[in-house]
Image (spheres, rainbow, N blue to C red):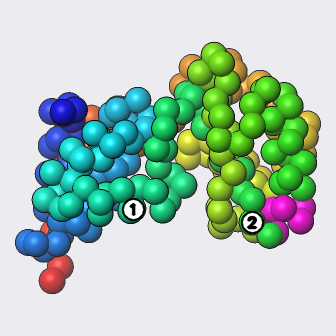
């Protein structure tokens, strides 16, 4: 059974304390983010079972949430996860061309990872930036009003960037958050 690092486990406890007694399931989203950051950027069934045990809920409750949101990876991913919006406004303004271009440039299809383990391409539901379509997200960064040239530049930057994150949470963030006081619960 996997286990969180001491810093991450401390942060899990703090997150759970935000919610009233018996409502620890409410902590599932941030705890899944932590788990993804701690366990190589994806949530295996064993990791999801571990999260369920920490939250005192059924494993199926974790699987349901993790499989619903595209921000959680249910299989191993590359160091750089490229999420391209596939909903109406982005598609109308060229997201399909962006996806095809990335697939050709990286030699992968949607849902696949490059052989070197650097890039994973995912098409996702709305990234909530319709006015800047087409859009893609890498880590916490939105890349808006994409052109194929802009995509090439972004990919080249990430090929040389050693600080690329696979999750919105990273080990540095976990360590900085672990020592902070929890927010009071309002009932």
Mark 1 nearby-residue class (10 Å; few <14, some 14–19, many ≥20): some
Residue drawn at the location 81% of the way across and 36% of the way down: 102
Quick check: is 56 in the magenta stretch? no
Residue drawn at the location 56% of the way across and 42% of the way down: 139
Can you identify the residue that label 1 sits on?
65
In this rendering, is residue 60 above or below 48?
below
Which image quarter holds the N terminus? top left
Q: Quadrant of residue 14?
A: bottom left
Q: Quadrant of residue 185?
A: bottom left
Mark 2 nearby-residue class (10 Å; few <14, some 14–19, many ≥20): some
Q: Position of residue 31 (x, y in %)?
A: 29, 51
Q: Position of residue 19 (x, y in %)?
A: 18, 70
User: Would you say residue 176 is visible in this rendering?
Assistant: no
Secondary element type, mark 2: loop
Q: Is residue 21 left or right of residue 162?
A: left
Camera-nearest label, 1 or 2 = 1
Residue drawn at the location 33% of the way across and 34% of the way down: 38
Determine the CA span between mark 1 and mark 2.
Answer: 21 Å
Q: Is residue 121 left or right of residue 39?
A: right
Secondary element type, mark 1: helix
In depth, the one of 6 and 50 nearer the eye is 50
Q: Position of residue 98 (x, y in %)?
A: 85, 46
Can you identify the residue that label 2 sits on?
87
Q: Is residue 54 left or right of residue 119?
A: left
Which range is magenta? 89-93
């Amino acid at each position: 059974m996997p286990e969180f690092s001491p810093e991450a486990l401390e942060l899990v406890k703090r997150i759970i304390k935000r919610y009233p007694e018996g409502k620890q399931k409410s902590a599932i989203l941030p705890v899944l983010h932590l788990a993804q950051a701690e366990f190589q950027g994806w949530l295996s069934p064993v990791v999801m079972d571990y999260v369920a045990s920490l939250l005192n809920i059924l494993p199926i409750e974790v699987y349901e949430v993790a499989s619903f949101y595209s921000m959680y990876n249910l299989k191993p991913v590359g160091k750089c996860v490229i999420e391209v919006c596939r909903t109406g406004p982005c598609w109308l303004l060229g997201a399909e061309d962006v996806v095809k271009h990335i697939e050709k440039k990286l030699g992968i299809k949607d849902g696949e990872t490059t052989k070197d383990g650097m890039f994973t391409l995912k098409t996702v539901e709305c990234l909530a930036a319709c006015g800047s379509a087409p859009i893609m997200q890498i880590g916490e960064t939105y890349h808006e009003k994409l052109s194929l040239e802009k995509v090439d530049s972004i990919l080249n930057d990430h090929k040389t960037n050693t600080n690329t994150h696979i999750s919105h949470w990273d080990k540095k963030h976990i360590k900085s958050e672990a020592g902070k006081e929890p927010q009071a619960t309002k009932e």
